């Protein structure tokens, strides 16, 4: 019987191709989803471990909840000497060891200055987390390997000499404290996964002077070093800083304000251990472990990567993988509907063959097993091809570099589930989808099968299906309503489950949508034919072909519902993602506008108006304002003291040119001050009284010097301000609050006052700030070029720093666009599968109506009218299902957007006319194309032959 089945499959190969394509696409989707998840895990793990460089082992603190505060203090006060690096390097099997210490310095050549993040060197460059692209890594005293961007900015090359200095070195030089600022050293290892530092790196090695290697005070002149190499950061270990320079031990010691490298605080040491033999490597690790201070141990790189992946398992990667995999499973469910229709077509075509098999002795069970065997073979072949297609597509995606737009470099990572899950799911779903057809093949007697019959399905959907559908929809609506209610309560600031259990509230919304959708699909037998009948009644007025098409659709509502549901799933998915993407972009754009209110900022004590004028002329700088600043303090309504950067502007109209925030109805005059709604330090609302008093003077100067607020007043601006004022200054104004942020994140708030306060002597300026609006795309230049050119303008002033929130904003927008485009592309396969189902349904319709079509032809219907009849039938199926899918998808997209993006700002609820129109247009066009083959079959056979065949 199996050999007969294989021969029947060979004979019906053309009919099996559509079902095979549906299985292939579905399994390819699932395989690609697993590969995508693997690639994201790999990329994020690589980012999190990029600072290891080529190290295969790491000395790190023991992780555990049993560590006391005393233990933690002990861990984070260890120095290089505590790790006995010389003895570790001398241990058999240890190729090299590198202590991890980092900070920031100012690099100067002539009248040009640039800031650079710096790290310790290593004997072998393989241990460095950055790549030496030219020259070599620092080995002897007084050497530096600069980042290429800093070298370009200063115009230096390998062999040149530059001066480096730091705030910690300057402090040590002025006080004679050789220990300097080593308590919180901005350890390179303290960086977060996104590259931002957990410590205040600027406070450790910001701009200033230095102590020479012999301990001499060089506070004013800095330390002259030789450039021995240029570095690149291909793995993004220090992406937030634009890469990292490498310093020789004596130079980084001086920049830390110390005179002994062994006194530098570290708590990570990277090792290169010969691991050619597991036994030898284990022995080396054991020997090294005996040299370590307590609460420290040696961990392999593989273990760190595994921990990194586990730490992300409840985060973005797992959510993304599960999100995509759920759509892959839905795509396979769509494919199952297509497969079910395909096998109905096959059974209808083979009714004479099946009858003959029954006549010559084949029993019902043999025919039943034959159909299931055919489905299993089809599922196996198509699933294997689908897995191969998924691997090929993912490999092409990784090689293309398209994912670099999301900030990740991805590679193809194969795993067991990539092969087993799609193939198992494909085979099982194919067999399950063929069960109904297998029953149909055995449901008639040989005599009945030999009679010309029409295989119309007249079974009415049961009451059980209706009850289950209603219960699912009601439960889904209730869960969605509960989720929306909890989110609205949270947004309003009231007690809500979403405040502490947000994942559960979000999960409730997702389950609610799934239940609603499942209920609608199950009940499609009831409502979809009614919609088809209503629309078809209007279409039937167009002529005989449309009337015949309308009548044909009503003949088998069950099959029409199955096909419509398949297309409904695909269109709903695409519309949901498209709506969510549009809402994400618009909502996040508004949120980013408030969180990144100014595109680029230059600030410092020695900025000049001439420099500001030159910066305004840089290509890509659309607008800019130059304003005086003063660091002041104030108390909020709760009595808490805040550091505030007070900026003088010529009215709110000048501010509107550069600040991306809603300033409508706001004025700035001599009696008022514009304050931000939220604190940059805490993110919480700043409570204010009817008036606020700003204070500047001796007390503020001392606080400023102690806290070292930052790049805006990098060289002791508070002290300078105190000298200018000669005493305490106060200013009392009426506050007006607006939601703007990231003007200068080093201060709790940035306040805008009328510039007259600075000109009339009410406030003594201790610095200046330039706020810029950037339009790099409109100017036809790269954003990085704009940033570099603005830096070059201010390079002659060591006290001026340039920051560019626009880069972070652009990165967010690029990631959103890239991810959403990828999702829409992946989900579109469901529509493709569903359209294959439309073609199958039309094919089955033609087979069922062979005698009817012949009769219509015999009484005068032309071939063109018959073709138009099938085309109208296909259009009705696709457009009605498509419109319902667009409506459902839009509602689901709005709900999802509200649940996710209301956390970041006021959610936008767009309707994607363009995308939804394209989806419906593609569905209509594909439906017309799907009707071509069945129509050709219907008109190709002469009426007499068709009547005889029927």
Image (cartoon, rainbow, N blue to C red):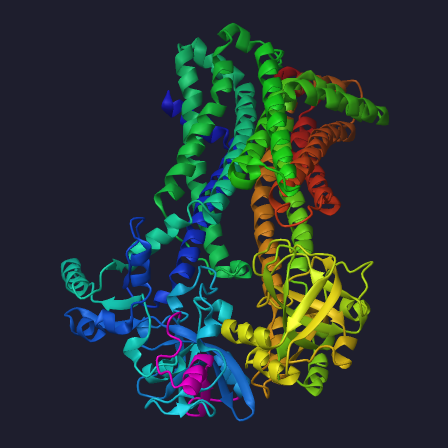
**Is residue 708 depicted above or below 8 in this figure?**
below
Q: Position of residue 780 (x, y in %)?
A: 69, 73
The residue lying toward the viewer, choosing from 914 and 539, is 914
Q: Determine whether 578 is above or below 119 in the image.
A: above
| Residue 179 drawn in magenta | yes
Q: Quadrant of residue 560?
A: top right
Q: Magenta stretch: give its range.
A: 155-184
Q: Is residue 840 visible?
A: no
Comparing 550 with 176, the one in front is 176
User: Quick check: 344 above or below 38?
Assistant: above
Q: Position of residue 118 (x, y in %)?
A: 42, 76
For the C terminus, give its image quadrant. top right
Query: Could one spot residue 652 in this view of the protein?
Result: yes
- Quadrant for residue 53, please give it: bottom left
Please tell me which residue is depicted at 59% across the width and 28% down the height of the picture: 479
Q: Quadrant of the N terminus?
A: top left
Q: Position of residue 85 (x, y in %)?
A: 22, 73
Residue 481 in percent (x, y) is at 64, 30
- Quadrant in the picture for residue 868: top right
Residue under the image location 33 percent in, 78 percent down: 121
854 to 408, vertically: above or below? above
């Amino acid at each position: 019987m199996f050999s007969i089945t294989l021969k029947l499959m060979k004979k019906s190969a053309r009919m099996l191709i559509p079902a095979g394509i549906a299985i292939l696409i579905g399994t390819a989707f699932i395989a690609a989803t697993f590969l995508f998840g693997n690639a994201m895990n790999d990329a994020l793990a690589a980012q999190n471990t990029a600072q290891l460089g080529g190290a295969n082992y790491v000395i790190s603190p023991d992780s555990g909840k049993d560590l006391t505060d005393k233990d933690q203090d002990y861990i984070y006060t260890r120095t290089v000497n505590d790790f006995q690096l010389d003895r570790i390097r001398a241990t058999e099997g240890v190729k090299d060891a590198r202590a991890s210490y980092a900070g920031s310095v100012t690099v100067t050549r002539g009248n040009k200055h640039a800031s650079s993040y710096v790290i310790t060197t290593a004997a072998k460059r393989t241990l460095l987390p950055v790549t030496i692209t030219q020259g070599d890594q620092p080995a002897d005293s007084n050497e530096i390997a600069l980042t290429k961007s800093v070298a370009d900015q200063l115009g230096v090359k390998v062999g040149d000499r530059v001066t480096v200095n730091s705030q910690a070195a300057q402090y040590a030089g002025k006080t004679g404290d050789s220990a300097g600022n080593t308590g919180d050293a901005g350890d390179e290892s303290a960086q977060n996964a996104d590259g931002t530092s957990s410590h205040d790196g600027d406070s450790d090695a910001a701009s200033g002077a230095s102590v020479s290697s012999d301990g001499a005070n060089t506070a004013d002149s800095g330390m002259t070093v030789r450039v021995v190499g240029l570095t690149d950061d291909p793995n993004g270990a220090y992406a937030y800083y634009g890469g990292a320079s490498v310093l020789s031990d004596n130079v980084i010691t001086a920049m830390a304000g110390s005179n002994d490298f062994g006194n530098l605080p570290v708590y990570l040491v990277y090792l290169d251990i010969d691991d050619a033999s597991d036994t030898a490597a284990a022995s080396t690790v054991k020997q090294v472990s005996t040299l370590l201070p307590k609460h420290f141990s040696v961990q392999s790189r593989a273990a760190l990567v595994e921990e990194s992946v586990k730490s992300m398992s409840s985060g973005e990667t797992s959510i993304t993988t599960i999100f995509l995999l759920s759509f892959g499973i839905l795509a396979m469910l769509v494919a199952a509907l297509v497969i079910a229709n395909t096998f109905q077509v096959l059974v209808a075509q083979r009714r004479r063959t099946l009858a003959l098999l029954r006549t010559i002795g084949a029993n019902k069970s043999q025919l039943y097993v034959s159909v299931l065997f055919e489905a299993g073979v089809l599922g196996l072949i198509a699933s294997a091809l689908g897995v191969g297609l998924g691997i090929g597509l993912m490999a092409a995606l990784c090689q293309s570099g398209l994912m670099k737009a999301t900030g990740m470099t991805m590679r193809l990572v194969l795993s067991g589930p990539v092969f087993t899950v799609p193939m198992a799911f494909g085979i099982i779903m194919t067999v399950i989808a063929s069960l109904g057809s297998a029953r149909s093949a055995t449901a008639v007697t040989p005599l009945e099968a030999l009679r010309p019959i029409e295989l119309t399905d007249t079974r009415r959907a049961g009451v059980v299906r209706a009850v289950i559908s209603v219960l699912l929809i009601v439960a889904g609506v209730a869960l969605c309503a509960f989720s929306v209610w909890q989110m609205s309560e949270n947004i309003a600031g009231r007690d809500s489950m979403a405040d502490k259990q947000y994942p559960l509230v979000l999960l409730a919304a997702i389950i609610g949508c799934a239940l609603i959708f499942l209920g609608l699909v199950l009940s499609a037998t009831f409502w979809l034919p009614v919609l088809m009948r209503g629309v078809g009644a209007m279409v039937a007025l167009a002529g005989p072909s449309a009337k015949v098409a309308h009548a044909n659709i009503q003949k088998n509502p069950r099959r029409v519902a199955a096909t419509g549901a398949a297309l409904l799933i695909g269109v709903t998915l695409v519309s949901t993602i498209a709506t969510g993407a549009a809402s994400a972009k618009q909502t996040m754009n508004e949120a980013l506008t408030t969180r990144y209110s100014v595109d680029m900022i230059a600030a410092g004590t020695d900025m000049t108006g001439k420099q500001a004028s030159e910066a305004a002329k840089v290509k890509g700088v659309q607008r800019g304002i130059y304003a005086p600043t003063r660091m002041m303090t104030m108390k909020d309504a709760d009595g808490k003291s805040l550091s505030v950067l007070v900026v003088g502007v010529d009215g709110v109209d000048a501010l509107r040119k550069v600040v991306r925030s809603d300033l409508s109805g706001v004025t700035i005059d001599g009696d008022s001050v514009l304050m931000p709604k939220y604190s940059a330090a805490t993110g919480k609302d700043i409570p204010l009284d009817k008036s606020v008093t700003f204070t500047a003077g001796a007390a503020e100067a001392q606080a400023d010097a102690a806290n070292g607020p930052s790049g805006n007043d990098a060289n002791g601006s508070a002290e300078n301000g105190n000298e200018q004022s000669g005493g305490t200054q106060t200013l009392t104004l009426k506050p007006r609050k607006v939601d703007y942020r990231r003007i200068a994140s080093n201060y709790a708030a940035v306040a805008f006052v009328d510039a007259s306060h600075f000109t009339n002597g009410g406030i003594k300026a201790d610095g200046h700030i330039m706020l810029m609006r950037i339009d790099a795309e409109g100017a036809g230049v790269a954003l990085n070029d704009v940033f570099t050119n603005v830096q070059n303008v201010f390079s002659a002033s060591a006290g001026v720093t340039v920051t560019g929130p626009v880069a972070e904003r652009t990165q967010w927008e690029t990631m959103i666009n890239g991810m959403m485009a990828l999702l829409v592309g992946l989900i579109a396969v469901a529509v493709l599968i569903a359209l294959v189902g439309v073609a199958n349904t039309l094919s089955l319709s033609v087979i069922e109506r062979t005698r009817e079509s012949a009769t219509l032809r015999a009484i005068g219907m032309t071939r063109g009218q018959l073709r138009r009849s099938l085309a109208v039938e296909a259009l009705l199926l696709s457009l009605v299902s498509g419109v319902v899918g667009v409506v459902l998808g839009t509602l689901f997209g709005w709900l999802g957007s509200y649940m996710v993006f209301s956390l970041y700002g006021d959610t936008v609820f767009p309707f994607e006319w363009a995308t939804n129109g394209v989806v419906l247009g593609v569905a209509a066009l594909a439906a017309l194309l799907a009707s071509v083959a069945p129509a050709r079959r219907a008109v190709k056979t002469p009426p007499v032959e068709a009547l005889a065949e029927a």
